[in-house]
Image: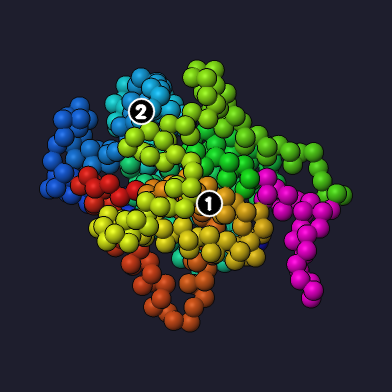
Amino acid sequence: MSVEAPARARPVRPLVFFAITAAVLHVVVALTNTLFAGVEPSDRDIPGGPAIVGWLHFDSGWYVAIAENGYSWIRGQQSSIAFFPLYPLVLRAVAATGMSTYVAAQVVTVVSGAAVAVVWWTWLGDHVDAAGRRVAFALLLLYPYAWFLYGTGYSDALFLALTMSAFVCADHRRWLAAGVLGGLATATRPVAPAVIVGLVAVALDRSGVVQRVRSEVGTRWRVDRDRWRPGILLVACSAAGLACWCGWLWWRFGDPLAFLTVQSSPGWDQAAGPRTWFKVRFFSLLFGGHLSVLRLAPQALGVLTGLALSPAVARRFGWGYGAYVVAVIGIPAIGTGDFMGTGRYVLAAFPVFALVGEWLSVRRTSWLAPAVLGAAAVGLVVGAGMFGAGNYLT
């Protein structure tokens, strides 16, 4: 590991970067919402005008409704149980101060996004040198689907802040803290099993219990029982969030996996099975020449790129992180029939951004990193603007 102790103690730089980017995106979203979206009847109760309304499209309404009214499930219909509970619980707690739930949704996301910036900067300081750290940091914060970190009423920013924090603790062998933070993360998004797998794998890797050993004859695995300590098991607390959610669903609705069952509802149409696993809908749109594939293909490319780079992540940052990348990208990729949504899910595969950022920082072509970051920034602004105008992108 390469740790830059002075920089670790100063979160000002990442916060300034986040604040400037957030300010730009908030102006863009307010403008596009004013010019192109208009005011829907469902928007009239949202305070703050376009500066708030533009960020609260689509699934934001589900989270606000859960925070205000709790969960319900009508079998065969789209229902709120598809959404994990921690984010709406935090919204309810913040709204209890007298704030509108809609405003609370934006506040929680912005604060969580700022936390992501600080924790991401910290994680990079443990793993890459100064040049790679700067490029990788900007690469994730300017990723074209990163507008979910800056103000949307979605749970992604909270999930990423908790997940990254859990891995920072695991890297420093703070097993209980990693397990607790991981448990909160698994109560936030359906990709929870990836967090559990990743934290356990990183714990075994960092502790040296399970080692991947390279030699002239190839790579082999070695288990060193002498390095085992019972405290390592504390990372298994990361399963608590998912377990509690499934237990509550079983008690309340009689189905511990109701959040998966509801995915087959008309309109979502994401039931598990060959049509979903083999992306029949995506390929029918692709070969049928439908324009909607233009918003799906970049997300599919992100998924395939992340999975393709997972072996390199394992070599560079350890096999535990390689396992995490495969799980955190692979689980949602299997569960979608057309790659819709996976663009933002790739954000959780943060070691991939570290790998690419480091690679860009050592290229002798001095213009390459600025060009990539510039293109990413343009994509981020365009994506946020289109989202603000009410376009369903992910």
| Position of residue 129 measured from the top left corner of the image (x, y, whole percent) | 57, 67
Looking at this view, name the residue that lies furthest to the bottom: 364
Q: Residue at x 48, y 38 (%)?
A: 189
Q: Closer to the camera, 168 or 146? A: 146
Q: Which residue is mark 1?
A: 330
In front: label 1 or label 2: 2
Q: Tell me: 117 left or right of 48.
A: right
What count of labels does the image hold? 2
Locate residue 60: give its quadrant: top left
Amino acid identity at mark 2: Gln
| Position of residue 385 measured from the top left corner of the image (x, y, whole percent) | 24, 52
Q: Tell me: 70 left or right of 184.
A: left
| Position of residue 371 measured from the top left corner of the image (x, y, whole percent) | 36, 72
Q: Residue at x 60, y 29 (%)?
A: 243
Amino acid identity at mark 1: Gly
In the rendered image of this protein, does residue 214 appear above or below residue 295? below
> Is 211 included in the stretch rendered in magenta?
yes
Q: Which residues are magenta?
A: 200-224
Locate residue 91: give its quadrant: top left
Looking at this view, name the residue that lies furthest to the right: 226
Q: Residue at x 12, y 48 (%)?
A: 35
| Position of residue 236 measured from the top left corner of the image (x, y, whole percent) | 68, 37
State whether residue 202 appears in this view. yes
State whether residue 90 appears in this view. no
Q: Tell me: 350 left or right of 26.
A: right
> Is 188 included in the stretch rendered in magenta?
no
Q: Which residue is mark 2?
A: 77
